[in-house]
């Protein structure tokens, strides 16, 4: 169930223009939309039922932007006067506000996808360096209650390997305002865990599936586990963790001939397929641009079998996937062109690694160590302050095309994909 949805209700306060039924009487000033205003969050009784009201102050006036339960209709909102508590949001120097928190629960994995890590695995983080379940929940709580995080995605490594996962999900789902809680997983073990996770309050899952062919799976992931992944997907769907999204990375000469078959597999089962361009985030540093299957190539392959029309770009918002209606819809397919079609300008993500480092970008070269601060006695105010500072320093883009680009020293599995 969707508990929060970014609205679409921009209500003029000082600038005039009332609103009815969530349909604004006018658009907010450009400065507010572009984030050049000064966003703060104001919690006050008159805004009950609206999560994270955000006050955007711009030279043209004050505007309220809120999050509302799906389907809730908004009327005119009160003005700026009388707001007392001011809560900061995670805003960077380019005006982007991070609301989507990706949390890595472990760097370990039971697969060895070749675009991610070598067959022999990696030097895993020693256990004492991993955040405990209580430490994870404490930081997530600060993010949700004090810093405007509205979506929490657990990932890894392989998050299903974390024994306390169901408990962590339940405690996250119990926070107020309630965040969207989702999981990115390779699906191994989901057959057993889908029901308990749904009962704990998990909303939905992304499951990685790169091939439908057993031999190709073994070649790609170095483990014979395709059947477990397919079983996990079916269990997620049966448990209502929908929409079940399927993530696929295509690799030249390995599985790039399977784009059509994979999409067909998803369409037949009501899953949403997402193809992701391979990024330079493998532990082996083996990524080569010429080997990457580009978004254009993916779309070219799919168009040989399907009629694809671009879906409403407004709906994409900050989502990385460009969405296309398949054969007129309503089924859709997403293509995530992280390298050739970067979406950094609309990015709303921030990441927490399994060892408690805040990263403002997958490709960041710097981290902020909340674990050390927490373990040396920092209170919530200090942790929130460090987190705000870490996001403030986010760069404009990942710079993969820049000659000075340096692949981050941590691989995707350690950062949390
Ligand atoms: N183990 C889980 C899984 O595979 O879904 C979660 C972690 S994994 C790092 C998260 C996502 O990152 C997966 O969909 C995976 O395919 C993707 N991924 C890993 N390495 C990648 C790379 N080098 N480029 C693009 N996507 C990558
Ligand atoms: Fe494991 Fe996910 Fe990396 Fe594959 S992509 S090796 S499943 S962490």
Image (cartoon, rainbow, N blue to C red):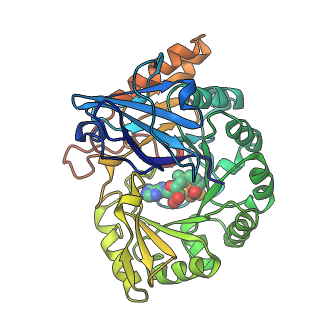
The picture places residue 162, in percent across and down from the top left corner, at 71, 43
- Residue 168 located left or right of residue 412: right
Q: Quadrant of residue 299?
A: bottom left
Residue 314 against residue 395 in the figure, above or below: below
Which residue reaches farthest top? Answer: 377
| Pick the front one: 349 or 5 | 5
Q: Answer yes or no: is residue 199 visible.
A: yes
- Residue 267 located left or right of residue 276: right
The picture places residue 114, in percent across and down from the top left corner, at 50, 61
The picture places residue 385, in percent across and down from the top left corner, at 46, 18
Residue 137 against residue 121 in the figure, above or below: above
| Pick the front one: 331 or 398 | 331
Point 30% across, 35% down: residue: 95
Point 57% across, 53% down: residue: 71
| Pick the front one: 90 or 164 | 90
How many numbered marks have been drawn onto this rendered protein structure? 0
Q: Answer yes or no: is residue 294 visible.
A: no
| Pick the front one: 94 or 50 | 50
Q: Quadrant of residue 81?
A: top left
Residue 12 against residue 109 in the figure, above or below: above
- Residue 354 located left or right of residue 55: right
Which residue reaches farthest bottom? Answer: 305
Quadrant of ligand 2: it is bottom right
Point 27% across, 40% down: residue: 34
Point 38% across, 47% down: residue: 24
Quarter of the picture holding the N terminus: bottom right
The picture places residue 331, in percent across and down from the top left corner, at 52, 76
């Amino acid at each position: 169930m969707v508990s929060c949805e970014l609205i679409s209700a921009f209500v003029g306060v000082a600038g005039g223009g009332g609103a009815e039924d969530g349909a604004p009487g006018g658009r907010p000033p450009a400065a507010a939309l572009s984030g050049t205003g000064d966003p703060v969050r104001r919690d006050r009784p008159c805004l009950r039922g609206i999560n994270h009201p955000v006050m955007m102050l711009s030279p043209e006036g004050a505007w309220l932007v809120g999050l509302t339960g799906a389907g809730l209709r908004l009327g005119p909102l009160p003005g700026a006067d009388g707001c007392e508590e001011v809560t900061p949001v995670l805003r960077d120097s380019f005006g982007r506000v991070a609301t989507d928190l990706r949390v890595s629960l472990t760097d370990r994995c039971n697969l060895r996808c070749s675009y991610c890590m070598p067959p022999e695995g990696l030097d895993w983080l020693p256990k004492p360096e991993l955040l405990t379940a209580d430490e994870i929940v404490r930081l997530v709580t600060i993010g949700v209650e004090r810093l405007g995080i509205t979506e929490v995605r657990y990932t890894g490594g392989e998050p299903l390997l974390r024994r306390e996962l169901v408990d962590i999900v339940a405690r996250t789902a119990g926070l107020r305002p309630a965040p969207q809680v989702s999981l990115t997983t390779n699906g191994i073990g989901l057959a057993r865990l889908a029901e308990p996770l749904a009962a704990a309050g998990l909303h939905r899952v992304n499951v990685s599936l790169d091939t439908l062919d057993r031999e190709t799976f073994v070649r790609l992931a170095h483990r014979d586990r395709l059947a477990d992944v397919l079983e996990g997907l079916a269990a997620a769907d049966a448990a209502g963790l929908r929409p079940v999204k399927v993530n696929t990375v295509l690799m030249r000469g390995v599985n790039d001939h399977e784009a059509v078959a994979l999409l067909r597999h998803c369409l037949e089962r009501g899953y949403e397929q997402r193809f992701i361009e391979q990024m330079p985030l493998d532990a082996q540093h083996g990524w080569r641009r010429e080997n990457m299957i580009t978004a254009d190539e993916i779309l070219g392959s799919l168009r040989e079998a399907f009629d694809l029309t671009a879906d409403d770009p407004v709906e994409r918002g900050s989502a990385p996937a460009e969405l296309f209606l398949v054969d007129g819809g309503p089924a859709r397919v997403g293509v995530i062109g992280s390298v050739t079609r970067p979406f950094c300008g609309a990015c709303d993500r921030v990441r927490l690694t399994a060892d408690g480092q805040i990263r403002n970008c997958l490709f960041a070269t710097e981290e902020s160590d909340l674990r050390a601060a927490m373990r040396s006695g920092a209170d919530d105010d200090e942790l929130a302050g460090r987190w705000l500072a870490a996001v403030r320093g986010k760069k404009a883009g990942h710079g993969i095309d820049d000659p000075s680009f340096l692949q981050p020293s941590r691989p995707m599995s350690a950062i949390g994909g």
